[in-house]
Image (tube, rainbow, N blue to C red):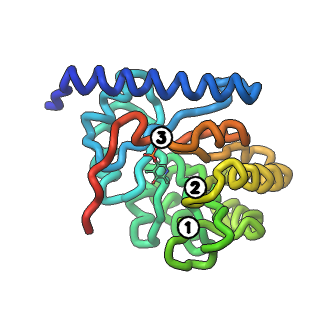
Amino acid sequence: MSHTDPERVEQVRANLRAARSRIEAACTDSGRDPEEVSLIAVTKTCPADDVRILASLGVTDVGENRDQEAAPKAEQTADLDLNWHFVGQLQSNKARSVARYADYVHSVDRAKIARTLGERAAAAERDITCLVQVNLDEDSRAGVIGSRGGVDPSDTLELADRVEEQERLSIGGVMAVAPIGGDPSQAFARLYEVACRLRDRYPRATVISAGMSGDLEAAIERGATHLRIGTALLGEREPIVG
Ligand SMILES: *Cc1c(COP(=O)(O)O)cnc(C)c1O
């Protein structure tokens, strides 16, 4: 039996309300309709009870970045019928597990993972919407330490083609994390250009997953359609050890 602490419910409710007001204010500033902007609650390091609380407050989309944590949480909350977004680095040996619960994978960053995930999705008889993760950090591309992952912007279309070759995968758009220490607004403007080029080839690929707790305003200003928000909803995380 899950047991939700009323104090925690109130805290998350207040956080959610504050996050929604930030989103609305940013939409007003950019002349955008808040209906165009979806909120994904990133629940990493938080218990399944928090997922239940979020769902009870109307959240429909949750995100996780590690399969070891996401798989059991998705199972424990399967009755809630949520959309699960996998937003972390995906290793081939986790593709089988991720294909069982993920509705969206935001972090497709190489042809091999598109192929493996496609095979696993077919085996699980599930459809997955994939986003190409784009590296917006010019200083740290090509696997240099400190890189936050993703393909060079110029490789986006090629990787989208690889996703589309897979029967059970479809290309949904792009995702990026703003480079540490850089100007998020500039980075997200770059992502927007990449997203437009992708949409020219695949009109259905309309998702721009950008913006976290600290930079959601810049992301909205630059056309984000999906925000991935953790800390602003659930509080500071304990650092992960190991
Ligand atoms: C943790 C995480 C987020 C959420 O970040 P916050 O700063 O807590 O809002 C978003 N995207 C990815 C890929 C993450 O790993």
Q: Which residue is mark 1?
A: 149
Q: Are marks 2 and 1 in contact (CB under 8 Å)?
A: yes
Above or below residue 136? Residue 60 is: above
Q: Are marks 2 and 3 in contact (CB under 8 Å)?
A: no
Cα–Cα span, label 2 and label 3: 12 Å
Q: Work out whether residue 193 or residue 217 is closer to the camera in this orientation and state it.
A: 217
Instruction: Indicate the position of residue 37 as horizontal and vertical percent values.
Output: 63, 32
Q: Work out whether residue 116 or residue 229 is closer to the camera in this orientation and state it.
A: 229
Instruction: Indicate the position of residue 143 as horizontal and vertical percent values.
Output: 56, 78
Q: Quadrant of residue 194?
A: bottom right
Residue type pointed to by label 2? Val
Instruction: Indicate the position of residue 198 as horizontal and vertical percent values.
Output: 78, 55
Q: Could you tell me which residue is drawn at 44 percent across and 64 percent down?
A: 95
- Badge 3 residue CB within 8 Å of ligand 1: yes
Left or right: residue 133 compared with residue 242: right
Q: Which residue is mark 2?
A: 177
Q: In the rendering, which numbered label is found on residue 79?
A: none
- Badge 2 residue CB within 8 Å of ligand 1: yes
- Badge 1 residue CB within 8 Å of ligand 1: no
Q: Earlier in the sequence, mark 2 or mark 3?
A: 2
Residue type pointed to by label 3? Ile
Q: Which residue is mark 3?
A: 229
Q: Could you tell me which residue is drawn at 14 percent across and 31 percent down?
A: 1
Residue type pointed to by label 1? Gly
Above or below residue 153? Residue 202 is: above
Which quarter shows the C terminus? bottom left
